[in-house]
Amino acid sequence: MSIQIPRGTQDILPGTVEKWQYIEEKAKEICTNYQYKEIRTPVFESSELFTRGVGDTTDIVQKEMYIFEDRGGRNLALRPEGTASVVRSFVENKMFGNPNQPTKLFYSGPMFRYERPQAGRYRQFVQFGVEALGSEDPAIDAEVISLAMAIYQKIGLKNLKLVINSLGDSQSRLAHREALINHFKPSIGEFCSDCQSRLEKNPLRILDCKKDRDHELMGTAPSILDFLNEESKVYFDKVQTYLSSMNIEFEVDPTLVRGLDYYNHTAFEIMSNAEGFGAITTLCGGGRYNGLVEMIGGPSTPGIGFALSIERLIAALDAEKVDLPINEQIDCYLVSLGEEAKDYTVKLLHELRDNGFSAERDYQDRKIKAQFKAADRHKAKFVAVLGEDELKANKINVKDMTTGEQEEISLDQFISHFQQKLR
Ligand code: HAM
């Protein structure tokens, strides 16, 4: 039997990869405008980084991590997300000592989760994310949210819904935790074994349970917003004021808890509202994680960020039928007639490319008609035809495929002709 691609992964082939390149370039360009700098971290890390960072009661750590022991006996994990790695690098490289704070970083790369594959859910997927470390100003929360929205909007999405919540500071969370335990404890026997074990360890996780989401106690669970202390309330109000001042529409959803343990204060998700979009509508998730840097061994430093998956972004673009402005045209296709002319196109093609033009010629020994067809398939802006007679006369025939205009030019002028026409 032939070997097949692993379940939950996909090949991104030419024809589709151009969409990925466009999106990644556009997202990088927007990050640069917002003054976020790229960081690249390894795809595998010590497993403990995620157990500690993401949280040992989360689904990601309990059920979804690709963990392995390397030949030296180290316990490693393929990264399920990017935030813990970025924070590890921030601490290890003492970025907190840089006078230019907050440290604003972006990243993009594959993440790995052993989830049940379905439309929009993969075992290897690509996240584009940002992290801003070192500021507790609610304006940076609003900046991070506005950056996420800008990426979607500038790429062409319209049917978006931004949902925000506050998970409060540790004091507010403690009060909410007690209320959650009291709420679920009497009926905890009706919940799944995960929820039962999470009741005392981390009752907030119960709200995120996929199995018990329809249990009636879920809908009546105490809302975190009723437990926010004054400071957390003021913080959350400020974030909302800043979002409104940028004309960014949002909904407050007190049931939004997120699937990772490091969050406090602002949490948010962006969903697609597009008709025909699959069952999984969350495009992007993020929030504040004051305390994570300390947990990973660094000095007390606040942080906030988000990550979006490019797979889901592309699915949303398809659902909204957005055409990306991808340039598939080449500058010149060289058509030749006769052996000597064909040989000469090797040099001409090289000169075109050396001068920065995209160009192609035939390598299949095609007849002239088929060479013209190939030029069409390459969407060539110009087709240059070289026959034996032209070669003898040191000339070449160049056709502008947009206007249909043809010119016979001297071979010595060939490159400068393109420089005039295309620059
Ligand atoms: P997350 O909500 O686990 O957060 O993932 C963020 C985004 O990654 C999701 O909204 C979704 O678009 C995408 N995603 C997650 N799992 C899959 C999957 N199996 N297949 C396809 N896409 C997926 C985080 O990862 C946090 N690190 C975000 C963050 C950054 N918070 C603060 N900074």
Image: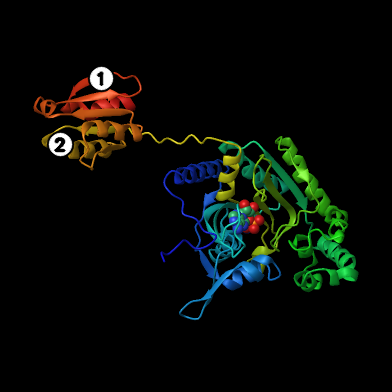
| Residue shown at 52% from the left, 35% from the top | 323
Residue type at mark 2: give it: Tyr
The alpha-carbon separation of the residues under discs 1 and 2 comes to 21 Å
Residue topped by disc 1? 406
Q: Secondary structure at mark 2?
A: helix
User: If you read the primary sequence from the N terminus, does the residue marked by circle 1 or circle 2 appear first?
Assistant: 2
- Choose top left, top right, bottom left or bottom right for residue 242: top right
- Choose top left, top right, bottom left or bottom right for residue 277: top right
Q: Secondary structure at mark 1?
A: strand
Q: Is residue 226 left or right of residue 19?
A: right
Answer above or below: position of 178 versus 144: below
As rendered, which of 161 and 123 lies closer to the eye? 123
Residue 1 appears at what percent x and percent y? 41, 66
As rendered, which of 1 and 308 lies closer to the eye? 1
Q: Is residue 240 left or right of residue 29?
A: right
Q: Is residue 133 visible?
A: no
- Do tag 1 and tag 2 residues touch (Cβ < 8 Å)? no
Disc ID at residue 344: 2
As rendered, which of 189 and 198 lies closer to the eye? 189
Q: Is residue 292 left or right of residue 175?
A: left
Residue 198 appears at what percent x and percent y? 77, 70
Outermost residue, left direction?
Answer: 392
Residue 116 appears at what percent x and percent y? 62, 62
